Amino acid sequence: MGKSKGRASSSGLAASLLPEAQGAVPVVGFGGYHGASRVEPAALLASSSADPDGSVRLPPDVDAEVLQHLRRLGRKDPTTKLKALSTLSMLFAQKPGEEVVQIVPQWAFEYKRLLLDYNRDVRRATNDTMASLVSAVKKGLAPHLKSLMGPWWFSQFDPATEVAQAGRRSFEAAFPQSDRRMDALMLCVKETFLYLNENLKLTTQALSDKVTPMDELEDMHERVISSSLLAMATLIDILLGVKLQSDGGDSMNTESKSHSKVRSATLSSAEAALYMHKYFIDFLRSKSAVIRSATYTLLTSYVKYVPNVFNEEAMKILSSTLLGAFNEKDPLCHSAMWDAVLVFSRRFPEAWSYCNIHKVVLNRFWQFLQNGCYGSKQASYPLIVQFLDSIPPKEVATEQFAFEFLKHLWAGRNQRQLSAADSLAFFTAFKQSFLWFLKNAPRNSVGDSSDYIRNRLITNVLVKMVWQDYLQLSLSKNMDVVPSLLSEEAATDDQQLSHKKSLLAANVCHPIYYYQDLGKCIAEILDDISVTERHLLETACESLLRDYLDIVQQGEKLSKFQDHVDQLVSFFRSLDILVVQNGRTWPLENLARPLVEHSLPAIKSMDSPSLVKLLLVLVEIFGPAPLFLKSSEINDDKSYVEPYLSLFNADFVPWCLDGKYSTCSSKIDLLLSLIQEECFFDQWCLIIKHTRAKQKQSVDHKISHTKDQFELLTLILQKVRERIAGGKLKNLQRSGSLPEHWRHDLLDSVAVSVFCDLPATDSHVHFLCAALGGSSQDDQICFLSAEAVCKIRGSILKSLASVLITSTFEWTKSSRFLLLPVEHEHSKILGEQSLSANLETAQLAFQVLERSLFALKTHEEDSGFSHILSALFIIEWECSMALVLAEESDLKGHKEEINVEALMCNTSDDHLDETVHLKANLAERIHAFRQSLIPSFWNDLHSGTLNRLVDILAQSVRYAVFDTIDLPIDRTAVLCSEWVVDMLRLICLDHIKLQSFFDALLSEGEYWPLWVKPSLQNGHASVKIQREPLTTDGTELKHQRFVAFVDKLVLNLSFGEVILAPLSSFSRAWVAADMICTWNWKGGSAFSTFLPSLVQYMKTEPGLEVSFVSLLLDTLLEGALMHESSDWALFNSWHLSDSEIEKIQDRFLRSLVALLFTAYTKESVLRESDAHVLFEQLRSSLFIGSTVNRKCLRTLPFVMSTIIKPLTEKVRLNEASLCTDLLGKSILSWLEEVISCLSSSPREVAQQDIEDWMQVVLSCFPLKITGGTSKVIVKFEREISDAETSLLLTLFSRYQTFYGSADPSLSSRETILSKTVELLGVKLTAVMVGYCWTKLGETDWCFVFRILRKWIESSVLLVEEMTDNINDAAVNQTSAQDILEKLKLIACTMEDLTFTFAESALVTLCHLNLVDNLHETDNSPHLQLIRSGEYAESNDKMMENILRLFLASGVSEAIAGSCSEEASSIIASSRVDHLHFWELVASFIIDASPQIRRSALDSMKLWGLTKESVSGLYSILFSSEPISHLQFAAYSLLMSEPLCQLSLVKGSSVGEIPLSSQESEMGQNIESMPDSEKALYLRDELTALIEMPTSELVKTDLVALERVNVFVAWALVLSHLQLLPLSSATREKVLQYVQDKISPSILDCIFQHIPLKTAAPSGKKKDVELVPEARAAAEASKGAITTCSLLPYVESLWPVGVLQMASLAGSLYGMMIRLLPSYVRTWFTSLRDRSLSYSIESFTRAWCSPPLLLDEFSQVKESIYVDETFSVSVNRSAYEIIATYKKEETGIDLVIRLPSCYPLRHVDVECTRSLGISEVKCRKWLLSLTSFVRNQNGAIAEAIRTWKSNFDKEFEGIEECPICYSILHTSNHSLPRLACKTCRHKFHGACLYKWFSTSNKSTCPLCQTPF
């Protein structure tokens, strides 16, 4: 039954097949007959007259393939049928029609059978195939049409929609035109009826064989019968009702006669079918609702179009069946049932006489109604009145029938929950039925007055039953009435049962729409009878009023009193919509006015909100005057105003304003509804005066009801606002429609007095907000005058400012004066209050502001509103600072960024006192309020308001920065900058206003700026340099505070926004200059924060205004030229860095050099033209007349050092210009100047002139030291001319002469050369070697080497002396503090100048070595001179000295470290002070030859210090103050000969035994040594790191020093393992030590640097999926495996970063899986995180295993010894190694299979063949090899080699260890030597130790004898 849903009825199908209008072209279904040509009769006559269902003999030319698929249609499998049908459909479309037509007879047989198939897909496919067939055969179908038409027509009524549509499509494919389809149908009418009749005769068993399940058979039978019935009904409708019925008249032509024959045939066939199936009675009694519904449809068609067949016999049979069909309980049948019943009763009214109406029809009808039509409400209820009309009048002409009908109809509504549509249908039917009975009462009354029946209907049904149900009154009494209406006889049992059900249904809770429809029904009934039966209306209204008054009288005693009144309200609203608005007056006259007249006193006394609401609704519907005044008092001349005002003032104002909370809101609504336009002002004045009078009365009597009166006013104003805004003032169209109409002086006075009557309460706030309005931009309704609003605004400002009175911060007092420049008495009163009282007042003021912002914003051009907004910012700022201060006091010493918003939201109350908590609460609310303001609010502010706002805020921020002394400088700076950023983000100022704000914020003041001040000269921006500003500690501190603030502001915003001000009328270059000159401040510095911000802006904004840069450079240069700078000679311009620039004393010069260095050297963002301008300024200032400007002369070299490169860039590119020519001439003139100074003897010339001019000259020949950790390169950045070269040679020659004359060792003169001149000479030597080394002669080279050797040896002596002193101090220490003091003294007394000299010498030597290496194949005289003789010896000696210096420094730190870590840190820090010197030293260490290293090592050994050289190298490598160059140099030395022999194992020595011999001897003697002596001990420096607990290490930062040191220590150990020979005993000991002593969880730390969880790399996507850190690690691991070296990754480690550490971690992992595969496997198999395990395995398989496996296979093929007994082969594609061992008559083949993720997974070993070996021994050998390859920490080849040796020894007769079944131990490869004294079996020492430790006993494993 469920499958048939959605199928159209037969009439629906017929209607869908008809054209819309005569002459329209039909597109679907059957159209009208238009005289088109029909199927040719000749073609039809040619068809066989034989039985169409009989077997057909196919012609011999039928296609075999088609025949095969036709046979497949007879199978039971639906899939086979579907495939066959699909294939046939394709074949029919492909083959010519002549071939297809041959199989139509066979197809017709299959077609009929397939249409009855159970599977709907088969039926649909059958119709689709039919469409293909008819499209192919076309007219060839005509001979077979009659045999096909029946099933064809039947298929179009299949319950499955898709099947029916497919059938219809196939029919339309054969007959596209509708008239052709009609012709075909008429042609085959008899055959169609015949087929349908045969279908109706079918039984369930006849449909299929016994195998089919019964449920399928029943479903098939139901479908066949229902479809056949519908097909027959539609056939009758079409042929008799549509097509043939219209024929006739005068045009009786041949075609009409043909139609007549068809009509006759149709009638006869239909009549025969009716009689054949006995009027279809059996189908009406079917259990199937689908069949019954189809039968009703068919009988309807018979009644309509074949009425003549219904004789008396048919009437007797069908009358009871059809008229009594109301026992049909399936709603699926009801629509068809109603059609049949109504058509039958109308067509045959006499049929009522053939049945018992009361028993058969009415009883069933009552049950049908009482049961809610059994679910078909929407289909049945609209037809009920039609059914009443069809019942014979005599049967309904009694009062009993009317009440029985209405009772059962009414009872049916409670059977099921009514839907909205059901409810509407029910009440529409009830109304129609009720009015039908009222209308037909006179006709139906018998013996009684018709009015009596009507009155009883009104009273007992409409009032007692319907009305009381609407009011939701208890139905117990009115249900007692209904049975008494039936008759005086006792009710039957069924009626009593029905009555009980109704009683139970009384408690049913109906939905809202039920009552809405019920009320509408009552209103429409009353309105209908008001037109015709006025007296009945009065009767009904009187009854309704009695019920209402009864409800009012009982009042709250009723449990549902409010529901009853609400229903009354709803009823009157329905009356308004349906009746009153249509101009009817009876609701007012008969209901509303009497209701008010009788119940108003009771309503007042009860004070019920529901009753007040009822009055309000009545007033809104009928108006106040018509409702409360008598008709006689209401005239058109407005004479009713006076009595109405009197009534309003006397009765309603006191009652509505009594202030009772329960009804206050409703009564105020009523009061406002009572206001009339004619007396608006009088009524409003009465309301205000009454409220004010009550307020004064309450105050006079000292009764605290003030709050109630404010609440009353608030409520009134809120409701007025709602009505004005919503346009609900229908009674006030002119007066009262605008806000200003409601303004009143008394209202203003009350509002203004709120802040004076302190303390204010919440009710005051609510009242003010209600009076002001302005809660949103659209709320422009204000009930106060502009003057009152202005006064309130002032009170709010004073209340908010009172919060700042008792603030602990000084700056708030100044800010408060900005808000309130004139002290007011009100402010003094607030100041005298407690802080908590002030905060409460401010809270209330803020609430008013928050809720009425846009009302207070009106007339904002005065200063009040801008000051209020400013106060909000300042209060929040003050509170945020108080919170930070509270946090500082609780978290002393804790440094973190302050987030103001987070602090306000998350500060713990436990740490704040009550005052701060109250402030925090207020500030939090203010912050949320400010954030809620949209940008358009600020944009819409008046220009003057915005200007005043930003000016006050700028001044307040300045006050906060300068005057805050309770917080640290950096905290204050961060906090104030966040204020500004937050304010600017919120307000969104345009560019002009933004720059005006910054002008005000950064303007000159008492404490800012300090070094550079702005000035205005001739209308142009300028600056004024403060030569020696008068400062105090307080001034400098405040200046520092403001500088730190500006710096944070620049970082948070941008340099361009804060400093540049491109469109400002006054440039702020002076701000940048003062910031740079300040240099350092708390939380930042010029180098670390400010200059990077400037450079970053210059990068992103290439259009930076030239005027700004020029002005900044000019300012700094002007300041630099005002002061005399220090010596440039001590300035390391060759290795320029931030720390070097910081050594410049003069702040202006330092700032200038820092700016130039950052902009040119670091970032290259300044233009070349800026450098030329700066050079011109310096050059022009160099001479004042003919006198040298000494200040400029000493400034010049600092500037030239930084700008010489951009100045000479065009010379290098051969692009000469006037500027470059001028530069060249200037350099030549300066060279000549210094040469002239050196021409005189030292006594005749002032050495100051030599110093100054040499500094200038040397600054023009720059050197640049570059390079990484491993190597330092000296570059010369200029290309000099021949003239400059010539002058340089002259200068060098003159200097040698000058130096010789001043050197005491070379001259007897007593002239002492100044250190500065001597240092300049060393720098000159470096310049000469760099720029002119090819021009130097032998004398020159002699001088060069003498100078270099002198200063290098001086530095060596200095360091060695320091080392001696440290050693003595450590040896002779008396206490820890004593040694620390001595070490500090030693570090402080080191001569810095010696290192400076030595640094310049090392630069020269570095370049000499570079020249030698670059020109290694060159044999020029100059190079031969350097490489030969004493120069080569001198070079080697200097290299040895440098190495000694390096080792001595390390040993000194090691000696100090033996005392304490602090002592070690003191020595390490002393190196940091000369960082560049030590970097140069390290560059020489790496390239030192083994001979030099050995010589230096011997020298250190002979020294006899308490620490040896290796300890010193480890101290440098793991220093607490690491220097990357020194660390890598130490690492390189530790890994190089001869130190590598000493750097791994404790107690090793160099030179005793060569490495190979030493290892050989150790291997020979190892077994004879006792276990205590066999143990290997790594050096303490390594052990302390690699044995560090991993649990501590994983918690450290990824770049923490401890982690870096551990990784470097592991790199050392792994690199040593790689260097040791495979057969080395030391190597085996180290491997055993790692396996036993060191936890493999170090790999957890390694994989912290390789993020794999985000993307597990695998396959070809590895390059795409890896994140940068994982990619670096992957490439490093692959490289380490391939190159067997970690050196490149250690070298690239410094400077340490996340990426560098990831690379080192990857290389360590790669080297570990190469050297320690078993160690790594142990860790991997212990992992519990499956996701991590999978990621690591994928990573290893993709990056590490391929090169490792390749190497393993290569080692197996190359390194394993192969002889006549042993051979090995490799299968790389299968990852297999096949080992074959043959000995005499025995042999074995073992296959070693390596996993693709080797070595993470275990290696598998399998024995594929054995010969002459027992199974037990074969298994032992297999286990032995498995143990070797799995436990081997090394290559597979080594494991196989060891296993072969194990075999060889077994054949030699050596017994295996009974514990491990191996002769050679799998780890240490020792023989079993420890024998049991009892059983004489020998064991490995390691196996026995493991046995004893695990078994907890010391007995022999075999004989259990004590060992």
Image (tube, rainbow, N blue to C red):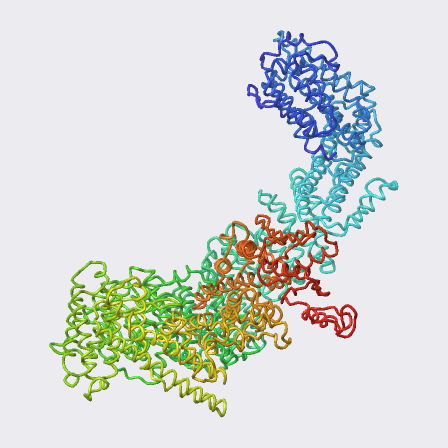
Q: Quadrant of the N terminus?
A: top right
Give the quadrant of the C terminus.
bottom right
In the rendered picture of this protein, how many numbered marks are placed on residues? 0
Q: Position of residue 1111 (x, y in %)?
A: 24, 69
**Quarter of the image where one finds residue 72:** top right
Q: Is residue 1161 left or right of residue 1556?
A: left
Point out the residue furthest to the front here: 1784
**Residue 1741 showing in the rendered view:** no
Q: Nearer the viewer, residue 1229 or 589?
A: 1229
Q: Is residue 1186 above or below residue 718?
A: below
- Residue 1721: image x %, image y %? 61, 61
Which picture quadrant has residue 1756?
bottom right
Report if residue 1801 is visible in the image: yes
The residue furthest bottom is 1374
Nearest to the observer: residue 1757 or residue 101: 1757
Q: Position of residue 249 (x, y in %)?
A: 63, 11
Where's residue 4, x and y in %? Answer: 71, 32
Q: Pick the residue in front: 1490 or 1677.
A: 1490
Taking the image as shown, residue 59 lies to the left or right of residue 942, namely right
Judging depth in this view, the residue of 1584 and 468 nearest the camera is: 1584
